Amino acid sequence: MTELLFINQVCVLLLVITLAYAATTDMRFYKITNPTSLTALLLFVPFVLTSETQIHVLHAIIAAVVVFAVGFVLFMANALGGGDVKLLTSVALWAGADHVFTMLVIVSVLGGLLSLGIAGYHYGMFYMQKAMQPTLRSIKIPYGVAISFGGFFVALQYLQPTLSHLSF
């Protein structure tokens, strides 16, 4: 393995660690910090510079800008948190035009399942008379978990060539 490929793959692994941290803090505190999203974003630079394959940076930037614009509208409609939008934008940069659609489908499906599960839990607690009646607006959903799993999919796309060369 060349030094550049090693650095490249370390960037991908650091992205996975960053996303796992984002998912954990979002589950525990319903917050994704700016340094977390910024780390995911900045790791893209050395990743691109050390890539052995061509990365279409302009396409990746366009994908991230489009995701940010839609995310901003959802944030203004109070449908998505600011940390979620920033993390999703960072992951979209990594996904680029090749993987952004699949990543967004993964995030949407997992986010929907997460929402149904959490809402079901809150309504179940209400019907068992252990909590006040929830409203859908009052239930917090840690979408950072779904976003992180979308990012794990993207990271796996970059790790796959390396993993396919391993033999045991």
Image (cartoon, helix red, strand yellow):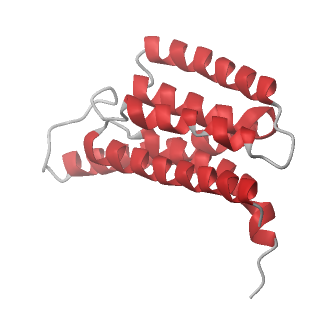
Q: Residue at x 68, y 43 (%)?
A: 47
Total numbered labels: 0
Q: Give the image quarter of residue 134.
A: top left
Residue 88 percent across, percent down from the top left? 55, 32
**Is any atom of residue 104 visible in this view?**
no
Residue 136 percent across, percent down from the top left? 34, 30
Q: Give the image quarter of residue 34.
A: top left
Pick whichever, 85 or 53, lies toward us: 53
Q: Residue at x 76, y 65 (%)?
A: 162
Q: Residue at x 75, y 34 (%)?
A: 96
In this image, 52 relative to 128: left or right? right
Q: Which quadrant, please, contains the N terminus? A: bottom right
In this image, 95 relative to 37: left or right? right
Q: Residue furthest right?
A: 54
In this image, 47 relative to 137: left or right? right
Q: Give the image quarter of residue 93.
A: top right
- Residue 150, placed above or below residue 2: above
Residue 17 percent across, percent down from the top left? 48, 54
**Is any atom of residue 54 visible in this view?**
yes
Residue 32 percent across, percent down from the top left? 37, 35
- Residue 164, placed above or below residue 42: below
Pick whichever, 71 or 120, lies toward us: 71
Q: Residue at x 13, y 49 (%)?
A: 129
Q: Which quadrant, please, contains the C terminus? A: bottom right
Pick whichever, 119 or 153, lies toward us: 153
Q: Residue furthest front?
A: 3
Pick whichever, 136 or 91, lies toward us: 91
